[in-house]
Amino acid sequence: MDLFEYQGKQYFARWGIPVSAGGVAETADDAVAQAERAGYPVVVKAQVQVGGRGKAGGIKLAANATEAREHATRILGMDIRGHVVRRLWIEHASDIAKEYYASFTLDRGAKQHLGLVSSKGGIDIEQVAAEDPQAIARLHVDPVEGLTEAEARRLVEEAGLDAPAHDGAVEILMKLYRCYTEGDATLVEINPLILTPEGRVHALDAKVSLDDNATFRHPEWEEFRVGEALDPREQLAREKGLQYVGLSGSVGIIANGAGLAMSTLDVVSQVGGQPANFLDVGGGASAEVMAGALEVVNSDPKVRSIFINIFGGITRGEEVANGIVEALRRVELRSPIVIRLDGTNAEQGRAILRGHESDRLISRPTMVEAARQAVALAAAGDREAVAPTTVAPYQGGVQ
Ligand code: GDP
Ligand code: MN
């Protein structure tokens, strides 16, 4: 789960990381009230989960109530790269002498945590990495050993932070590492981490991603779900208790088992298609579960074909087939379905499906054949949707 800046700052504050005092506002009146409380000058900040808000005009300084109202009115409802601003964070403005960068994230390849510190903050770290890689200091942290203060200090020095910022930055790094590990985050990022003219170091922005697998030990995370910017497809999947991740392609995927679902994404990509999602219906594939899964995939306007890939283990093929047939009665689908059913009692299952086959419901015996068929149907669907009278050039690898 990704947090909004204001939630990230609340999270930071639990570990004593210094952030500015402020409050949330959903109307211009609220914004003025929060600004009065924080004390002018204030900064009015759009709460959307996308970077570069500053450049997009979503962050403005206000010296008085008139300006606070003006900025709040302009920013509320603004569309920042596809994210509509529904909420503002108003905080007392800071004076900035220097802007730095600090983060911890998981380096899955190295199986370690990765700390990054840079003397160049306020701009995308990716941009710094491309233009001036020397300005970024990196440190792998063994999750068992943890981070020592001496290591944090070396990181800060190596990044070339100004001397007056060293002590403050080291203290923040130690707290940020605890927030990251004890707080079960997969990313904590401060950009910019600022040095004020008075010599204080302070987090001016907060980006926090929480590890959803740790939700069970954080009942307090529930409050962060309020106003969560969920993909509507993911929202629907959550309501139905399905393991779903939205992607951007046109082939909807339904599979049983996370491993098979991931292989299905791979095979679809391999034959030139683009998966619209990951969806694992779990061990069983009852009509109930299958109908829910189809409903979620069907709700995605980009989906042009649906690939159901089921390998019967404990679940028997005829149960799965009956589940699918029953689900099709309940959900009115916009796209054709290709089914690959294999494993326990696959023959019986296929026999049931055969009775319902049409050009909207196609059964294929192997995963690759089914993937090819689904990708071809998706391409055909795209052609229809994009240009009904002309043939769009399809670049996929389907023969
Ligand atoms: P982002 O653009 O979405 O990353 O939003 P940030 O919260 O990082 O703010 C972008 C930029 O706005 C920062 O790098 C600062 O230069 C500026 N900014 C944000 N808050 C303040 C503030 O309190 N005072 C001043 N002077 N500038 C600020
Ligand atoms: Mn930022």
Image (tube, rainbow, N blue to C red):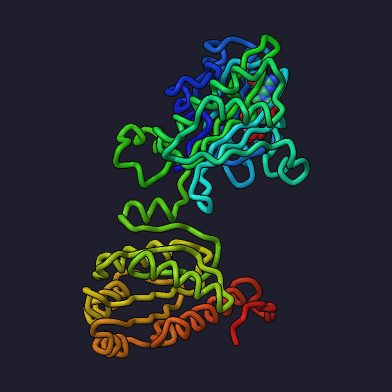
For the point 51% across and 35% down, which residue is it?
Answer: 4
Can you say whether 355 is above or below 281 in the image?
below
The quarter of the picture where the N terminus appears is top left
Can you say whether 282 is above or below 341 in the image?
above
Residue 60 in view of the camera? no
**Quarter of the render that holds ligand 2:** top right
Q: Position of residue 258 (x, y in %)?
A: 37, 64
Q: Position of residue 238 (x, y in %)?
A: 35, 52
For the point 30% across and 68% down, which residue is it?
Answer: 290
For the point 68% across and 77% down, which residue is it?
Answer: 392
Q: Relative to 345, is 13 on the left or the right?
A: right
Give the quarter of the image for residue 11: top left
Q: Residue furthest right?
A: 131
Give the quarter of the image for residue 135: top right
The quarter of the picture where the C terminus appears is bottom right
For the point 64% across and 45% down, which residue is it?
Answer: 81
Residue 271 in view of the camera? yes
Count of marks overlaid on the render: 0
Q: Position of residue 285 (x, y in %)?
A: 27, 70
Can you say whether 36 is above or below 125 in the image?
above
Which is nearer the eye, 65 or 239? Answer: 239
Can you say whether 177 is above or below 162 in the image?
below
Q: Position of residue 341 (x, y in %)?
A: 33, 81
Which is nearer the eye, 300 or 138? Answer: 138
Which is nearer the eye, 50 or 99? Answer: 99
